[in-house]
Image (cartoon, helix red, strand yellow):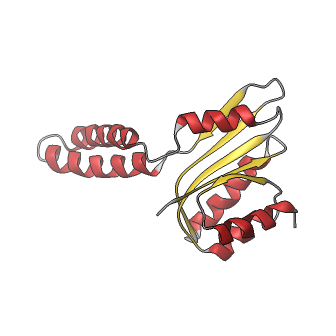
């Protein structure tokens, strides 16, 4: 079952840096994300959300593309593929596998100006690789659906930069 993890940081850049570090771990196949987003509250208090395409949109786009290609492939292969991709992405977006927008707003409202937050939905992970990616950063767990012992381990790692 996927786990939601929300980490807050006391500067506007660190959430994005952590997301990039986790993306590198994902490229190595040691973590699998369903969704991620960075929320930044600038010095004026304005909220900026930088969302990744969630897994539902990706799965929908691929499945729609294949179905569109199969159905339209005989007569209009390119048109069938493009229509399937667009339709599949729309269906995937409607499935809304990501984080509820109201929760994102609650977290964003709680941030102080100049702070940031990282939202990640982790489907699978090699714990050692995930922890190693987070060691250079200092943050605070805002919310997690991890088991209590794993959550405590994550809290300890984020207490100090290493």
Instruction: Kindly indicate the quadrant of the structure image that contains residue 39.
Output: top right
Q: Residue furthest front?
A: 148
| Residue at the (64%, 73%) spot, across then down | 127
How many numbered circles does the render carry?
A: 0
| Residue at the (87%, 62%) spot, across then down | 161
Taking the image as shown, residue 106 lies to the left or right of residue 100, namely: right
Closest to the observer, 61 or 145:
145
| Residue at the (16%, 43%) spot, across then down | 72
**One can see residue 41 in this view:** yes
Q: Is residue 49 above or below residue 60?
A: above
The x and y percentages for residue 156 are 80, 67
Taking the image as shown, residue 73 lies to the left or right of residue 58, namely: left
Q: Is residue 97 above or below residue 86?
A: below
Closest to the observer, 127 or 20:
127
| Residue at the (83%, 35%) spot, across then down | 114
Q: Residue furthest left?
A: 74
The x and y percentages for residue 99 are 53, 44
**One can see residue 133 in this view:** no
The x and y percentages for residue 97 are 44, 47
The C terminus is located in which quarter? bottom right
The x and y percentages for residue 136 are 82, 63
């Amino acid at each position: 079952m996927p786990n939601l993890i929300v980490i807050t940081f006391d500067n506007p850049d660190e959430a994005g840096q952590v997301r990039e570090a986790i993306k590198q771990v994902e490229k190595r196949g040691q973590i699998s994300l369903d969704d991620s987003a960075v929320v930044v509250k600038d010095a004026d208090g304005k909220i900026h959300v930088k969302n990744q395409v969630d897994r539902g949109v990706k799965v929908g786009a691929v499945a729609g593309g294949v179905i569109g290609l199969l159905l339209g492939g005989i007569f209009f292969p390119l048109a069938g593929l493009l229509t399937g991709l667009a339709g599949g992405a729309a269906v995937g977006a409607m499935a809304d596998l990501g984080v509820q927008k109201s929760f994102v707003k609650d977290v964003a409202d709680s941030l102080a100006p100049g702070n940031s937050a990282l939202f990640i939905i982790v489907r699978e992970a090699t714990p050692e690789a995930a922890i190693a990616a987070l060691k250079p950063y200092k943050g605070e767990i805002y919310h997690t659906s991890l088991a209590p012992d794993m959550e405590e381990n994550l809290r300890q790692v984020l207490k100090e930069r290493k």
